[in-house]
Image (cartoon, rainbow, N blue to C red):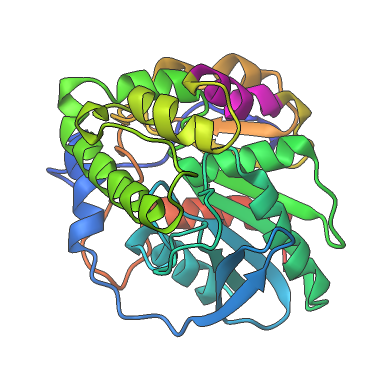
Amino acid sequence: MVHAMPLVARSSFRPLIGLGNPHLQTVLPAITRHMPPLPWSRERLELMDGDFLDLDWLNSGQGRLLIISHGLEGHSRRPYVAGLARAATRRGWSVLAWNFRGCSGELNRLPRFYHSGASEDLAAVVTHAGQTGRFEVMTLAGFSLGGNLTLKYLGERHTSQIPVGAAVAISTPCDLAAASAAMETLQVWPYMFRFQKEILRKWALKKAVFPGLIPEINPRCQRTFRQIDDTFTAPLHGFAHAEAYWQACSANAFLPSIQVPALILNAADDPFLAPSCFPQEFARNSPWVHLEVPERGGHVGFMNRWGSQSDLWSEVRAMEFLESFCPA
């Protein structure tokens, strides 16, 4: 069984013929996977600080619940979230995909946003789900930034009425400083440009709503995550600078405290990640943290088939892992 050996020696992922390139793996699932709309049911969770989170439920019944955290500038309707949600419901699970602050289509109420370490929001979602009294077990899945958030949450060992039974973190930048540096290379500039555009758009919206409370920045000087985090993300959320933010929020620092079966699923060719995002030595000696590193897969890719009706390899793999610890 996989859970008897935390460092998975050989991954079963094989890319679709002709799609071994990491950039094809990263881009194609996002732009070619046209899935039918899922029957989401939206709920607004009011937070203690006066803000809100929009939660999307699917097959909200009883039994096992999967809580999904999306990635940077994502939301619950992204194909990668919807794909995993559909894979879970096909196996009889209930799903809660939550939207980070400002990511549900409506600007959040406070000056602050979401960030890589905002595990208090995930804690609020888990607590709320547990208080419904409908579920016997809860599990977590996070993509990219959401994966870092998920691992940090587990390492902080929050308490809930229903404990988290297992978790999966996919394409996770476990070392935020190193991953930010990796995003400065020329090969990933198109991705960085897209992130930059979306982040600066929200900065402008926030600045218009909260004049004087949002850090002043020069948009022309915000070309890297170091620049964005140093002048915007870090000061807005109480960190002295980007390095302080990265050090406080990187998942690697929280892995030793995790006491829940957790799988980190990172492709070796992920263009967004650095070597320190693959904690192999730690996983080799950990009873809880599992690491699987397919040779191919890109970032949130793992495309092994065409068509929108079939589950991708990563979705099947994630559900297999969760169900090995949380059987029906």
Q: Quadrant of residue 247?
A: top right
Q: Nearer the viewer, residue 160 or 116?
A: 116
Percent from the top left, x then y, of residue 129? 73, 69
Q: Residue at x 43, y 38 (%)?
A: 171
Image position, residue 103 (x, y; %): 43, 60
Q: Is residue 313 left or right of residue 317?
A: left
Residue sitting at 66 percent across and 32 percent down? 289
Task: Report whether 224 appears left or right of 92.
Answer: left
Magenta span contains residue 254: yes
Above or below, 13 relative to 78: above
Instruction: Point out residue 179 in the picture as x, y percentages from the top left corner.
Output: 40, 24
Q: Which residues are magenta?
A: 243-255
Q: Quadrant of the N terminus?
A: top right
Q: Quadrant of the C terminus?
A: bottom right
Q: Considering the whole magenta stretch, tell me its main secondary structure.
A: helix
Q: Would residue 202 be counted in the magenta stretch?
A: no
